[in-house]
Amino acid sequence: MQKVNKNEFDSLIKEGYTFVDFFATWCGPCKMLSPVVEELSKEYTDVKFVKVDVDEEEELAMKYGIMSIPALFLLKDGEVVGKTGGMQPIDSLRAFINNYKK
């Protein structure tokens, strides 16, 4: 799972499914969620997993209306198909991905 900036982000999300974890380094729940998302990235090899630091990439955070973190988005071909947030167990995030990934 890689941390990306705006330029990388825009090119990565163009095709296929992308799971985006909007986070901040100072965010406790974000730190707790990180290993869960890392595990998912190993399970869903057909989905790109990226992290966006909202403090470093304020423009992306504003574009996607991030009001609280962690914020988790699933995009398909650059379009948001689902979003959720907060610390969640891995089974909930699997269900989130499976619900929107068709």
Image (spheres, rainbow, N blue to C red):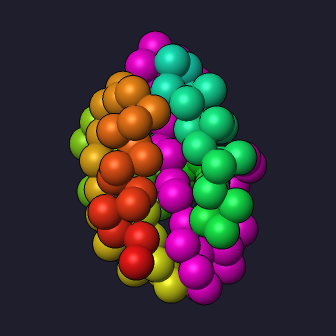
Q: From what the image shows, is residue 24 above or below residue 4?
A: above
Q: Residue 89: image x %, image y %? A: 39, 27
Q: How many marks?
A: 0
Residue at left offset 34%, top offset 50%? 95
- Residue 10 or residue 91, whichever sits in front: 91
Residue at left offset 61%, top offset 65%? 47
Q: Give the left or right position of residue 79, taking residue 6 as reference.
A: left
Residue 9 among magenta residues: yes
- Report if residue 99 is visible in the image: yes
Q: Residue 94: image x %, image y %? A: 43, 47
Q: From what the image shows, is residue 9 above or below residue 83?
A: below
- Residue 17 or residue 80, whichever sits in front: 17
Place residue 48 in its image quadrant: bottom right
Q: In the rendered image, which quarter contains the C terminus?
A: bottom left
Place residue 100 in its image quadrant: bottom left
Residue 52 among magenta residues: no
Q: Give the left or right position of residue 36, taking residue 38 as reference.
A: left
Q: Which residues are magenta?
A: 1-30
Q: Give the left or right position of residue 32, taking residue 64 as reference.
A: right
Residue at left offset 39%, top offset 60%? 98
- Report if residue 62 is visible in the image: no
Residue at the far top: name it: 28
Q: Give the left or right position of residue 52, taking residue 92 as reference.
A: right
Residue at left offset 34%, top offset 38%? 92
Q: Residue 80: image x %, image y %? A: 35, 72
Q: Residue 14: image x %, image y %? A: 59, 84
- Residue 13 or residue 98, whichever sits in front: 98
